[in-house]
Image (spheres, helix red, strand yellow):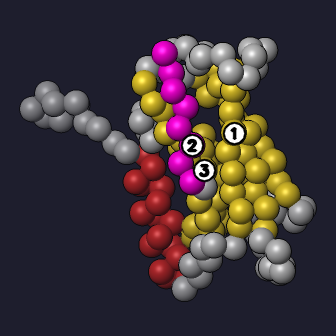
Amino acid sequence: MTSAGVPLSIKTENILTSILNHTAKLTGTMQLNQLKVSLSGQVKGEPENSPIKRGDILTIKAAVQRKKGLQAPKNQGRTFMALVNKKTGQVAIDECELKNEIERKEFQHQVREAGTNPFQLIVFDGKGMQDTSFVADFTVE
């Protein structure tokens, strides 16, 4: 709340991407389009085509693969995946290793709002953003 009693809205995704972009500018290491990033999701235990309801726990599977012909940089350091619900601003971050041919992670996310919930995956390291996925929309009843 602000001093005027107005709710303060913070967009976590904007803070995260601003920090990553600033870090990349300082280090001179913008590395976009080196990874193939994909998302899929459904409610565990429910048929694939069943509707997602408000309050359900959505399991979102992320897959990150280095594009053919590109080698992992030496001294890769720590790498992270951030799953962003662009509607609610919720962000879940998990560490990953991009040493394998394909890296897979599962995120559990409780859906809080009905309607279209767009999700995006951001892959980054200590030098800045590496890549992002296309936005995957999940419709919630």
User: Which residue is drawn at the image coordinates 57% and 54% (left, top)?
Assistant: 134
Question: Does the rendering let one see residue 75?
Answer: no
Q: Is disc 2 in contact with disc 1, using a CB cutoff of under 8 Å?
A: yes
Q: Start and end of the magenta stretch?
A: 134-141
Q: Mainly helix, strand or loop, the magenta region?
A: strand
Residue under circle 3? 121
**3D distance between C-alphas at marks 2 and 1:** 7 Å
Residue 40, label in figure: 1
Question: Does the rendering let one see residue 29?
Answer: yes
Residue 119, label in figure: none
Whichever of labels 3 and 2 marks the residue nearer the N terminus, that label is: 3
Kind of residue sitting beneath label 2: Ala
Does 139 lie within the magenta span? yes
Kind of residue sitting beneath label 3: Leu
User: Which residue is drawn at the image coordinates 74% and 14% (left, top)?
Assistant: 46
**3D distance between C-alphas at marks 3 and 2:** 9 Å
| Residue 44 location (% of width, % of height) | 76, 20
